[in-house]
Image (cartoon, rainbow, N blue to C red):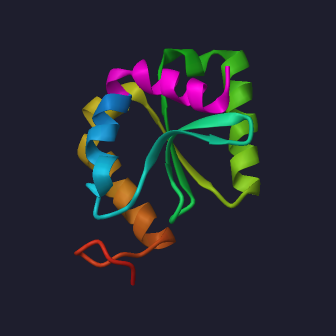
Amino acid sequence: MGVVARARALRRKQTWAEKMMWSWLRNRRFNGWKFRRQHSIGPYYIDFFCEEARLAIELDGFGHWLPDNQARDEDRQKFLVRLGIKVLRYPNARLRRDAQVIRDALYQTLQERAPQNVDGTST
């Protein structure tokens, strides 16, 4: 399966957590930052990616806690860090429980990496 087809397939079968996060981020809703979902970087697909801030957001369901998957996630993290990409990783369950805490952390990280004014313009 090609890169575009794979990304489209992943977008079609989003988890509830990915749907929730995308509702915050799509169409520059999050203070004007542009995000892509299921963005391909090297051999990996990133749940959400902001090029301007070089920020990846990964949402983890139960399968990510299995040892083989943890090793793969660690390899992905190292790969992205080498490219200058910061990774924020959250368990799906935490998204529902601590939505505002996660939104605040995301906003803070974006401001540190790609500051914008209140109206969404770069500083």
Question: Is 80 rendered above or below residue 46?
Answer: below
Q: Residue at x 51, y 65 (%)?
A: 52
Q: Give coordinates of residue 56: x percent, y percent.
A: 54, 48
Q: Is residue 16 above or below residue 23?
A: above
Question: Whole-percent x and y of residue 122?
Answer: 39, 79
Image quarter (top left, top right, bottom left or bottom right) of the N terminus? top right
Name the side, left or right, on which 67 lies relative to 15: right
Q: Position of residue 70 (x, y in %)?
A: 67, 25
The residue closer to the viewer here, 113 or 100, is 113
Q: Quadrant of residue 54?
A: bottom right
Tell whether 23 sits left or right of 116: left
| Span shown in magenta | 1-17
- In this rendered view, identify the residue nearer to me: 23 or 76: 23
Task: Name the quadrant of the C terminus.
Answer: bottom left
The residue located at (69%, 49%) in the rendering is 80
Please state if 24 lies on the left or on the right of 67 as rendered. Answer: left
Q: Is residue 91 magenta?
A: no
Establish if 111 lies above or below 27.
below
Q: Main secondary structure of the magenta part?
A: helix
Q: Residue at x 59, y 32 (%)?
A: 4
- Image coordinates of residue 46 in percent, x first then y, are 57, 39
State left or right for residue 24 relative to residue 38.
Answer: left
Q: Residue at x 41, y 75 (%)?
A: 115
Q: Quadrant of residue 84?
A: bottom right
**Label tally:** 0
